[in-house]
Image: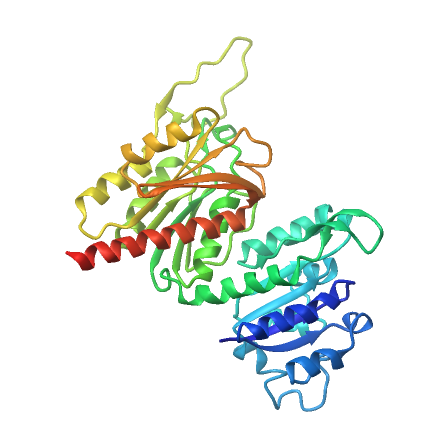
Amino acid sequence: MALIALGVTGGIGAYKAVEVCRGLQKRGHDVVAVMTRAATRFVGPVTFEAITRRPVITSQWKPGANADIEHIAIADEIGLLLVAPCTANVIGKFANGIADDFLTSLYLATKAPTLIAPAMNTNMLSHEAVQRNLQALAARGVRFVDPGEGYLACGWIGKGRLAEPDEIVAAADRMLARRDSLLRGRRVVVTAGPTYEDIDPVRYVGNRSSGRMGFALAAAAEARGAKVTLVAGPTDVEPPATDALIRVRSAAEMHAAVMQVSEQADLVIMAAAVADYAPAQTAQEKIAKSDGPMTLTLQRTPDILADLGRAAARRPSAPILVGFAAETIDLLANAREKRVRKNVDLIVANDVSVPGAGFDATTNAVTIIGADGEQTLSLQSKARIAEAILDRVEQVIRVRHATTAAR
């Protein structure tokens, strides 16, 4: 079992952190509480001290701070940093590298995975600044327990209340279990974002992909201990920290990069929205505007997933292949056919015409299709979708191991 640092920040949901602490202990974990100054106005430190049987950390200026695990050494010792509740203020500090108390300093100092349970007013949660900070943290591999809906302390009804303690404890347990993931030490290639196919030095053919789904998958694989190579097209979203990052622009560049790095890979996830067609010729100078129409001739781009599937058919130890099928009609039929035709293990099908799913959204709704069945996931965060996809990948690994052992 693990030592968990339970960060408690200044919100009315702080009282629920006591139940979270108890729940973690019931699952066999050791807990040390780290409280912000504002949190102590809602719950007394002595409460957590009595439950954890450890001194509660409320300041980074306590005398003898370098002497024991409850202070400086905690960053190296903990298996998980869990912050519940986490206010908009602390989320902003985490996202922007501000370290003005022990909790924010701990976040920057520890290499342990971080799990956050946000809690705040509905309008605060939906504010652009808060959403941007949450996205930045997600890109770095931070995981979240989404807030619930209901009556808030401010008297409003809406989303923002702290998730229930049992849900938070279960999420923490899942994160700790991933330390023993079948992906640990494996070489994983993930593609993300769009490709831009240049018409001339100014114009290009592209698509609306933000890269968020691929980035969520890369971050989730990294958190499970994989050695991740991220091949990313042009995006405005900050990519997560991975073992290697390869930036590309066109479908041809992505094809070359993926085919090279996939030779040593154990898993390839093609989450990028690769252009199917590119201009047959790219003008070296800007094409001047004229009064008449302009004809643009497009040619087929390399099919990366199909080429990976063909290569896998020739290799005795081929990587597991995961593809995506973004459709607007006949979603499942098209995705099933694509999985077989391109010789891949899993296809993740999503209807990009559904509001909140697909391109340039923080959420998604998908069906994971494999030879052993289909799994439909309702609209939820792309981070959660990524975890479900990797869980399914681990099932494929188990089946491969069992098949190999039976030979």
Q: Residue furthest top?
A: 292
Q: Is residue 389 visible?
A: yes
Q: Residue 262 versus residue 310: which sits nearer the camera?
A: 310
* Above or below, 368 relative to 61: above
Q: Quadrant of the C terminus?
A: bottom left
Q: Position of residue 191 (x, y in %)?
A: 41, 45
| Residue in the image at 50% along x and 47% along y | 385
Q: Residue furthest left?
A: 407
Q: Position of residue 162 (x, y in %)?
A: 70, 58
Q: Residue 140 versus residue 356: which sits nearer the camera?
A: 356
Taking the image as shown, residue 372 lies to the left or right of residue 206, namely left
| Residue in the image at 32% along x and 42% along y | 256
Q: In which quadrant of the rendered view does residue 102 lie? A: bottom right
Taking the image as shown, residue 230 lies to the left or right of residue 173, namely left
| Residue in the image at 53% along x and 46% along y | 382
Q: Is residue 265 visible?
A: no
